[in-house]
Image: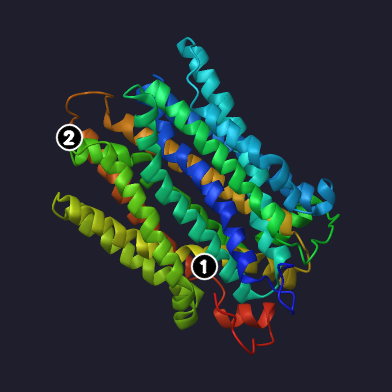
């Protein structure tokens, strides 16, 4: 089996294997987003305000790496411009550094903070060395827009499955391995998670084919950047996708706090919510191609986002009943899941759209800056989650929290995602129409749409 169909389009098994890359990437980054704030504040003894600054500074500094990687790819400096070797060489080190983030070295407070900065920053750099080339794979695997939507669907199925696994397996492993000692349980659980995640991230480097080489571009950086910011489609999808990461960090970073402090439920209930987020988003991802065929890509973002915002209100003002809360949160995440494949299909399309309308090919730079913006948004979201705890006066291990602290946690967990959804709806309406994208990118209509 060569992994291609007769017309050199990715076969089903190749598209499925592509999804393992984001299963690994989303699991490893989701682990840090979900559990690292809690680990730093409640296990390793770092203050919430110090964690807020760490999340912001480390992610912003790390994000500078993304455009550098894009520059290397565009200039064909490393690996001859190919993207799969990045996954081959950097996936396992990424898994190892994720483990190091949760390794509680016996240091003084200043040393603990320095260790947190060093490991969190190094993990982010390696994440960039994997995820930027991985994100460019659809551009070198196929030129067909429907295939790209299919690849994005499998990618998001992997990503949302990772969310389910992060929510359902990490805390049980911490409990089993630690026997109640979180300083022992977290590093042992993360050693397994890092090894498995690094191994899964390797899979696309062996199974996915680069059918369309990225052309070398020797244009000055100012020309590359100028072409990107003249690319309306790329600017809009980059902004909206970045906002999505703020939404995600709110759910990841505050789920444990919302479960224990606001709902007065056991800590594992926060993991249940994260698990439901993953399972529901899988279903939403699976329904996304159908909705996109019915109403187009733009409305496949607008309609689900509006419905998710309504769901957030129903969740927040509904009864504190476990079944209701899990079901309502599942509905919210189902609608959000429907947007995900379209986001990443739009990223791939917008890169080629920019080449067509500006005459400048800047694929590596375009995706790397898109990733950079996402990293900054993730940094803002992670820092915001930690800052919300500090602003509200959250006290670790306190028997009860103040009403102000509870209000801040509630706003962070529910209000921030609602604001993101409504703002995203307004911005995505400025994206080029379906007819314009098809006319520029794929003027010939497909005779037979290929099924997922």
- Binning the other alpha carbons within 10 Å of mark 2 as few (below 14), some (14 to 19) or many (20 upward) gives few
Residue 368 seen in render: no
Determine the residue positioned at 71% across, 76% down: 5
Query: Relative to 228, does residue 52 appear above or below in the rendering?
Result: above
Determine the residue positioned at 74% across, 62% down: 209
Label 1: which residue? 342
Numbered label attached to residue 11: none
Residue 126 falls left or right of residue 117: right
**Earlier sequence position, callout 1 versus callout 2:** 1
Looking at the rendered image, the quarter that the C terminus falls into is bottom right
Looking at the rendered image, the quarter that the N terminus falls into is bottom right
Label 2: which residue? 403
Image quarter of residue 12: bottom right
Query: Relative to 4, does residue 439 appear above or below in the rendering?
Result: below
Disc 1 or disc 2, which is closer to the eye?
A: 1
Residue 113 falls left or right of residue 447: left
Q: Position of residue 9 (x, y in %)?
A: 70, 74
Instruction: Give the residue furthest to the top.
Output: 108
Q: Position of residue 295 (x, y in %)?
A: 45, 81
Residue 424 falls left or right of residue 312: right
- Element at label 2: helix
């Amino acid at each position: 089996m060569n992994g291609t169909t007769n017309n050199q389009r990715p076969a089903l098994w190749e598209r499925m294997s592509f999804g393992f890359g984001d299963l690994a990437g989303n699991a490893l980054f989701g682990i840090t987003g979900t559990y690292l704030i809690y680990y730093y504040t409640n296990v390793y003894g770092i203050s919430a305000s110090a964690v807020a600054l760490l999340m912001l500074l480390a992610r912003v500094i790390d994000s500078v790496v993304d455009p550098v990687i894009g520059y290397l790819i565009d200039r064909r400096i490393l690996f001859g411009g190919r993207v799969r070797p990045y996954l081959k060489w950097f996936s396992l080190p990424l898994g190892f550094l994720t483990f190091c983030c949760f390794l509680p070295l016996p240091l003084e407070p200043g040393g603990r903070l320095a260790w947190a900065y060093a490991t969190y920053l190094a993990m982010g750099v390696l994440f960039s060395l994997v995820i930027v080339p991985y994100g460019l794979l659809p551009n070198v695997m196929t030129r067909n827009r429907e295939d790209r939507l299919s690849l994005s669907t499998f990618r998001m199925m992997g990503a949302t499955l990772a969310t389910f696994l992060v929510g359902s397996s990490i805390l049980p492993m911490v409990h089993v391995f630690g026997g109640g000692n979180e300083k022992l349980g977290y590093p042992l659980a993360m050693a397994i998670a890092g090894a498995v995640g690094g191994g899964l991230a390797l899979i696309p480097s062996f199974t996915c084919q680069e059918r369309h080489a990225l052309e070398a571009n020797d244009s000055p950086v100012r020309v590359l950047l100028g072409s990107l910011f003249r690319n309306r489609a790329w600017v809009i999808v980059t902004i909206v996708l970045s906002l999505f990461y703020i939404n995600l960090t709110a759910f990841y970073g505050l789920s444990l706090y919302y479960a224990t402090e606001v709902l007065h439920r056991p800590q594992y209930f926060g993991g249940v919510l994260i698990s439901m987020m993953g399972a529901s988003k899988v279903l939403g991802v699976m329904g996304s191609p159908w909705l996109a065929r019915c109403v187009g890509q733009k409305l496949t973002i607008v309609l689900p986002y509006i419905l998710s915002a309504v769901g957030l209100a129903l969740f927040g003002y509904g009864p504190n009943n476990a079944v209701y809360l899990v079901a309502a949160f599942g509905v919210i995440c189902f609608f959000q899941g429907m947007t995900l494949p379209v986001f990443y299909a739009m990223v791939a399309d917008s890169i080629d759209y920019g080449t067509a309308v500006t005459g400048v090919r800047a694929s590596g730079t375009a995706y790397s800056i898109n990733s950079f913006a996402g990293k900054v948004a993730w940094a803002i979201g992670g820092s915001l989650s930690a800052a919300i705890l500090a602003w509200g006066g959250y006290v670790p291990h306190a028997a009860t929290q103040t009403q102000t602290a509870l209000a801040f946690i509630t706003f962070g967990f529910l209000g921030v995602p609602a604001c993101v959804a409504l703002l995203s709806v307004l911005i995505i309406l400025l994206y080029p129409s379906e007819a314009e994208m098809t006319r520029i990118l794929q003027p010939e209509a497909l005779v037979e749409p290929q099924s997922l």
